[in-house]
Image: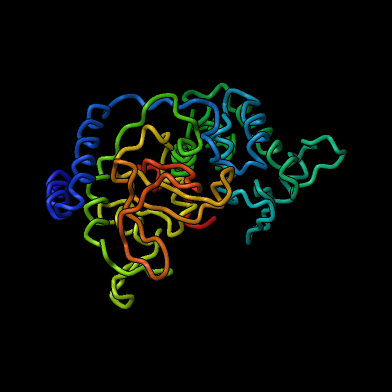
Amino acid sequence: MTVRKAWIWATVAIGTALGFVMLLVLGVYMAAGNLAGEAGQRALGLAKNAVPAAYAPIVQKWGNLCSAISPALLAAQLYQESGFNPNATSPAKAQGIAQFIPGTWAVQGIDGNGDGVADVWDPRDAIPSAASYDCKLASYVKDAPGNTTENMLAAYNAGAYAVIKYGGVPPYQETQNYVKTITTLAQSFAAPVQRLDPSRQAAGAIYYAQKKLGTPYLWGGDGTPDQGGRFDCSGLTKAAYESVGITLPRVANDQYNAGPHPKRNELLPGDLVFFSHDPTDSRAIHHVGIYVGGGYMIDAPRTGAVIRFDPIDTSDYFGATRVTADGAKALPTSV
């Protein structure tokens, strides 16, 4: 079934009582189609609350250390490495929010906060060190042909020698994937400078979610037969986008990074809308729904309730994400 056919059937199936909502959805979605194809330029600044408040000023400052990086790119690297967890460790003995291995830290670690100690576990040191290391790598490959930022990321993954040898991003699949992942993921941390393209899969995701209206909520529910086809909030949004070929992470606070973030007055049907008890930290998001227009979403709200329409303008409204296929693919499998 095509997305447009899915949309038509979704509008019919909702019934007269909710018809006003769905008609508004259709009108907004079709109007948004005129935006498709516009360039999606991103500002250097961070999207509101995309980075935990404790780290946002550090990322904003040090993300402008050199022209090869930006605050959004630095944020994407930190999220990819640790999910902004300052206590993260890895089997390879990488440490801290920027995941430096001890040997690299011994050479590249700097005293970013000026307390006389370069501490890998202190984000005030580790984040500046990550930015400094990026800029050093950029200086090593500055004469290589191609995009400076992409060459810097390739040097981070494969070493500066490989970038110089191949005259740009080397033909290693792992390195090419890393470059694409970080540059794509950076878009979910950047403040957009103009309206965002509508998602082509949005109508299909809404159509899927609409068919689940009235289904009882289940904590941890993914809609599987052994769960009686029941969902929790992020299980529903994951399944809705999976139905149109986009795989999202399982939990809501990671789904927030699956694309750029429209403002409240720029929402389009199909956008994911998020709610948090901490308005400054996307890692504290506790709920997600699918926007359908007119200030309403389809969501699986809580134990004892059913999948239904709810208003989005509540005290814990956090923000929204316009899901993209590339944005979803760029997300780490676990952070």
Work out whether residue 162 can be spotted.
no
Q: Residue at x 25, y 40 (%)?
A: 200
Q: Is residue 83 left or right of residue 250?
A: right
Q: Position of residue 3 (x, y in %)?
A: 17, 46
Q: Position of residue 88 (x, y in %)?
A: 65, 56
2 and 143: which is toward the camera: 2
Q: Is residue 1 above or below residue 72?
A: below
Q: Position of residue 252 (x, y in %)?
A: 46, 55
Q: Is residue 232 above or below residue 138?
A: below
309 and 334: which is toward the camera: 309
176 and 81: which is toward the camera: 81
Q: Is residue 3 above or below residue 13?
A: above
Q: Quadrant of the C terminus?
A: bottom right
Q: List the single residue furthest toward the right.
A: 116
Q: How is the image coloured?
A: rainbow
Q: Residue at x 25, y 32 (%)?
A: 32
Q: Is residue 97 left or right of residue 301?
A: right
Q: Is residue 113 left or right of residue 56?
A: right
Q: List the single residue furthest toward the front.
A: 17
Work out whether residue 87 can be spotted.
yes
Q: Residue at x 33, y 47 (%)?
A: 296
Q: List the single residue furthest toward the bottom.
A: 226
Q: Is residue 39 above or below residue 14?
A: above
